[in-house]
């Protein structure tokens, strides 16, 4: 960027474009200044922030920055990416790291774009813990008075996650690379502590959360350094199979949120995808999705997309995906298409060829000189695990 983005946001008193600065520093800082300027203004400033935050339907990163993980090119046949799409069953909360805020319990958001997210470091820590529980940590705690002393990670956990940070000898970073998960909406939960004497509520405590029903994506890259597999003496297929069990337990049982003991942060796994290099052992074992021949968009379809190849905002729902046929019919005079049938035709084309169209716009056209990454989709993590375990090579190198 050629300008200071923070200064640019600060100029906007009440920005209208959500993707531009919905809950970013410009708006939040102005609410905070208002909050601190006068004791009588505290509640007004807080209500202003909460009204705007709960009214935003599609918080998302600017698509043209391409900040999400891209597994379209992998440099080594032993590397592969995993994407797990899930839907929150209960609210998700992680406290924001801003030192000052109009709320006591704001949810963690990107400082520039104001989009709520779960950091890569949080994923790594929680998944390491879930895998340890799968490996017997709970039984160890029971036998040793709930103390971790004496626990040693099995080889597959060290291979995937590396050593603890305080390990000075034989340090390993781990073969997994984690990416943040971005959420598209926030809402508010209220906890009202009651007095034990009067049994009446005292002072309501507001938590800014990502509400149940919001979708998210966990992205992992398995990228071992040359020689790591042999040095760690592990079978990568067995390690990834154990990891998939850990992911399932973390999302569906333990939860990924703060206040997990209250049931926050549990999720339902929807689908998962595996990305691997064409011609690798994984292609022979897992196969690939049926590839559709690319069909360029009709001229009238181009007016329904922005310059990056994404649908225009009116055609997107709160999760950043194309709206349904029913939702489109409710747009009334705001419909950008001449007919409902034209929208349905565009939607069918976009779902089959939209990604390839965007790649062509960005210049990332497939080249025969570069090994191509292919995708294999699965209905569940259990199906992916079964495919890996049935692999004849077993991931051996």
Image (cartoon, rainbow, N blue to C red):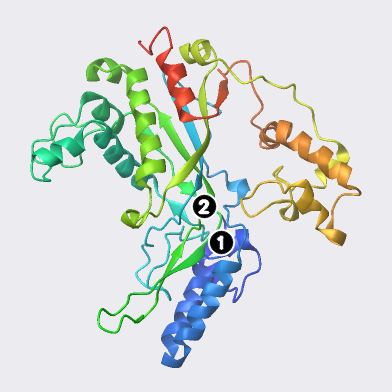
With respect to residue 5, does 102 lie above or below?
below
Disc 1 or 2, which lies upstream in sequence? 1
Secondary structure, mark 2, is: loop
Q: Are marks 1 and 2 in contact (CB under 8 Å)?
A: no
Question: Quick one: label 1, few (<14), some, or many (20+) residues within 10 Å?
Answer: few
Residue 150: name its quadrant: top left
Which residue is rendered at x = 84% and y = 55% of the image?
335
Tell me if residue 104 can be seen. yes
**Residue placed under numbered mark 1 in the picture:** 3
The picture places residue 326, in percent across and down from the top left corner, at 78, 50
Which residue is rendered at x = 36% and y = 62% of the image?
97
In this view of the protein, which residue sits in the foreground, 266 or 41?
266
In this view of the protein, which residue sits in the foreground, 259 or 208?
259
The picture places residue 42, in percent across and down from the top left corner, at 45, 85
With respect to residue 314, does 174 lie above or below?
above
Outermost right residue: 338
The residue mark sitting in front, 1 or 2, is: 2
How far is disc 1 from disc 2 in space, using C-alphas?
A: 27 Å
The picture places residue 217, in percent across and down from the top left corner, at 50, 42
Secondary structure, mark 1, is: loop
Question: Quick one: label 2, few (<14), some, or many (20+) residues within 10 Å?
Answer: many
In this view of the protein, which residue sits in the foreground, 13 or 290?
290
Q: Specify the quadrant that holds the N terminus.
A: bottom right
Tell me if residue 4 can be seen. no
Task: Give left or right: position of 12 versus 79.
Answer: right
The picture places residue 111, in percent across and down from the top left corner, at 46, 61
Q: Specify the quadrant that holds the C terminus.
A: top left
Which residue is rendered at x = 32% and y = 77% of the image?
194
Task: Give left or right: position of 18 versus 277.
Answer: right
With respect to residue 282, does 109 lie above or below?
below
**Residue placed under numbered mark 2 in the picture:** 183
């Amino acid at each position: 960027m050629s300008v200071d983005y923070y200064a640019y946001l600060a100029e906007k008193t009440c920005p209208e474009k959500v993707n531009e600065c919905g809950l970013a520093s410009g708006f939040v800082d102005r609410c905070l200044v208002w909050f601190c300027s006068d004791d009588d203004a505290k509640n007004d400033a807080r209500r202003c922030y909460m009204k705007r935050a709960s009214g935003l339907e599609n918080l998302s990163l600017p698509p043209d920055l391409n900040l999400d993980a891209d597994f379209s090119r992998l440099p080594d046949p032993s590397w592969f990416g995993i994407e797990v799409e899930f839907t929150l069953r209960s609210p998700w909360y992680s406290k924001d790291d801003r030192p000052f805020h109009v709320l006591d319990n704001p949810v963690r958001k990107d400082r520039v774009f104001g989009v709520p997210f779960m950091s890569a470091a949080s994923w790594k820590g929680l998944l390491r813990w879930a895998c340890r529980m799968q490996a017997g940590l709970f039984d160890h705690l029971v036998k040793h008075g709930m103390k971790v002393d004496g626990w040693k990670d099995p080889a597959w956990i060290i291979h995937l996650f590396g050593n603890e940070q305080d390990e000075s000898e034989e340090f390993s970073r781990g073969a997994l690379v984690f990416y943040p998960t971005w959420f598209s909406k926030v809402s508010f939960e209220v906890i009202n502590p009651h007095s034990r004497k009067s049994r009446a509520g005292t002072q309501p405590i507001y938590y800014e959360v990502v509400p149940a029903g919001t979708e998210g994506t966990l992205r992992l890259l398995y990228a071992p350094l040359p020689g790591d597999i042999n040095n760690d003496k592990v079978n990568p297929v067995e390690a990834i199979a154990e990891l998939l069990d850990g992911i399932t337990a973390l999302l569906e049982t333990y939860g990924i949120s703060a206040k997990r003991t209250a049931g926050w942060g549990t999720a339902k796994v929807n689908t998962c995808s595996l990305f691997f290099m064409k011609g690798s052992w994984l292609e022979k074992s897992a196969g690939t999705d049926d590839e559709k021949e690319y069909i360029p968009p009709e001229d009238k379809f181009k007016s329904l997309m922005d310059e990056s190849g994404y649908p225009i905002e009116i055609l997107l729902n709160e999760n950043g995906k194309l709206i349904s046929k029913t939702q489109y019919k409710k747009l009334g005079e705001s419909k950008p298409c001449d007919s409902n049938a034209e929208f349905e035709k565009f939607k069918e084309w976009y779902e089959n060829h939209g990604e390839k169209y965007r790649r062509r716009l960005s210049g990332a056209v497939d080249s025969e000189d570069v090994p191509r990454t292919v995708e294999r989709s699965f209905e569940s993590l259990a199906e992916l695990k079964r495919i890996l375990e049935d692999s004849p090579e077993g991931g051996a190198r």
